[in-house]
Amino acid sequence: MVLQTIYAEVIKNLEISKMSMAQETPVVQIVDSPILPLNEDKIGKVKGILIGGFLAGFFTVMWLTVRRLYRQLMS
């Protein structure tokens, strides 16, 4: 009877220690750490100006088209 009680206490303590270990263990595991310094991918000035000009022109045409359609619907 004494051995059963001791065994039950040991098992209870083991379960409590498992629960406390699970609470302290981080959930996220680092898989791969970065190699520093990281390479920077830059867009060239000419390419940036061309893409920016194209986007600005596209959005300007879209804005003028929507504004014209809105004014036609309101009149």
Image (cartoon, rainbow, N blue to C red):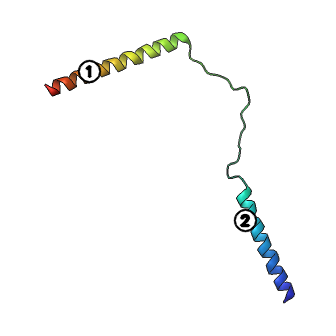
In the image, what residue occupies the spot 42% across and 13% down?
Answer: 53
Q: Quadrant of the C terminus?
A: top left
Q: Amino acid at mark 1?
A: Thr
User: Residue 74 sits in which quadrant?
Assistant: top left
In the rendering, at what x and y percent does residue 25 appear? 73, 55
Q: Quadrant of the N terminus?
A: bottom right
Q: Earlier in the sequence, mark 1 or mark 2?
A: 2
Label 1 secondary element? helix
Label 2 secondary element? helix
In the rendering, at what x and y percent does residue 69 appear? 21, 24
Pointer 1 residue: 65
In the rendering, at what x and y percent does residue 55 appear? 41, 18
- Circle 1: is it few (<14), some (14-19), or many (20+) Cα within 10 Å? few
User: Residue 66 sits in which quadrant?
Assistant: top left
- Circle 2: is it few (<14), some (14-19), or many (20+) Cα within 10 Å? few
Quick one: which residue is furthest to the left in this view? 75
Pointer 2 residue: 19
